[in-house]
Amino acid sequence: GPLVAAVETMLAVPPLDPQYQTLWASATEARRVEVVGNVIEVDLTDSVDYTGAAPDVAELATQELVYTVTAAASMTGAAGGAMPVRILLEGQPTDQLWGELDISEPVQRADQLAVRQLVQINNPAEGAVVGRTVEIDGEAAAFEATVGWQIFSGGELVDDGFATARECCTFSPFSFTVE
C-alpha cells in the first residue's frame, strides 16, 4: 500500500539535494507499515548495522522515517501527522537505533524547526536546466519572512535579492521569478 511504498522510496532513493544525507542503508526494506490503533508501526528488515551513529545524526535519520510515514498516512486520510511511529526490526520491538537513540517508545514528529533546513527550494529541482526566466518556489522559516537568495554561474555571483515568505518564523511558502 501507500505507506509501504513511501518508506520503500525513502529507503531506496538517495536525496537529490547533496546537502541532505541519509543513514538508512538501501539494503533495508519495509516488511510491513500499518496503522495499529493510534500508532503507525514500521517493521524494517534487520539487514544492516544500526549502531555507531552520532546521536544528532541518528535523531535526524529517525525523523526522516517518521516524517515520511506520517505524511504518507495523512495523504491516505489517516491522522498521520499526529500519530507516533513504532519502529520494529524483523517484527520485534527494539530499544535503540544506531546504538544511541532510544526508540523503546513510539516516536513523535520533532519540531520542524529542529529537523529541517530553514530554507527549502522545491523548484527548480537540484541540477535542473533552466531557461532565461526562472520561477523559484519553496518553503522557509525566516525572520521577518525575508528569504535572501543568490544566483551563481561558474562560481561567480550574477544576481541576488530577497523574497518574502507568507509568514514569519514558521515554514511557509515563498516564490519569485528571476530573469
Image (cartoon, grey):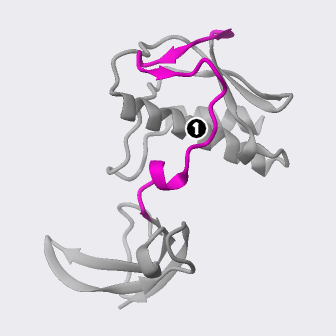
Residue 47 is situated, as x and y percent measured from the top left of the image, at 50, 11
The answer to whether 33 appears left or right of 153 in the picture is right
Residue 15 is situated, as x and y percent measured from the top left of the image, at 43, 45
The residue under the point 32% across, 78% down is: 149
Instruction: Give 72 or 146, whichever is nearer the viewer.
Output: 146
The residue under the point 47% across, 79% down is: 145
Question: Above or below — where is 131 with respect to 83?
Answer: below
The residue under the point 47% across, 23% down is: 101
Q: Residues within 10 Å of mark 1 (few under 14, many from 20)?
A: some
Q: Amino acid at mark 1?
A: Thr
Query: Among all residues in the image, which is located at the extreme bottom?
Result: 179
The answer to whether 99 appears left or right of 110 in the picture is left
* Residue 113 within the magenta-colored segment of the rendering: yes
Q: Is residue 134 visible?
A: no
> To which residue does mark 1 refer?
9
The magenta span reads 90-119
* Residue 176 within the magenta-colored segment of the rendering: no
Residue 46 is situated, as x and y percent measured from the top left of the image, at 54, 11
Q: Secondary structure at mark 1?
A: helix
Residue 117 is situated, as x and y percent measured from the top left of the image, at 41, 57
Question: Above or below — where is 22 with respect to 171?
Answer: above
The quadrant the C terminus occupies is bottom left
The quadrant the N terminus occupies is top right
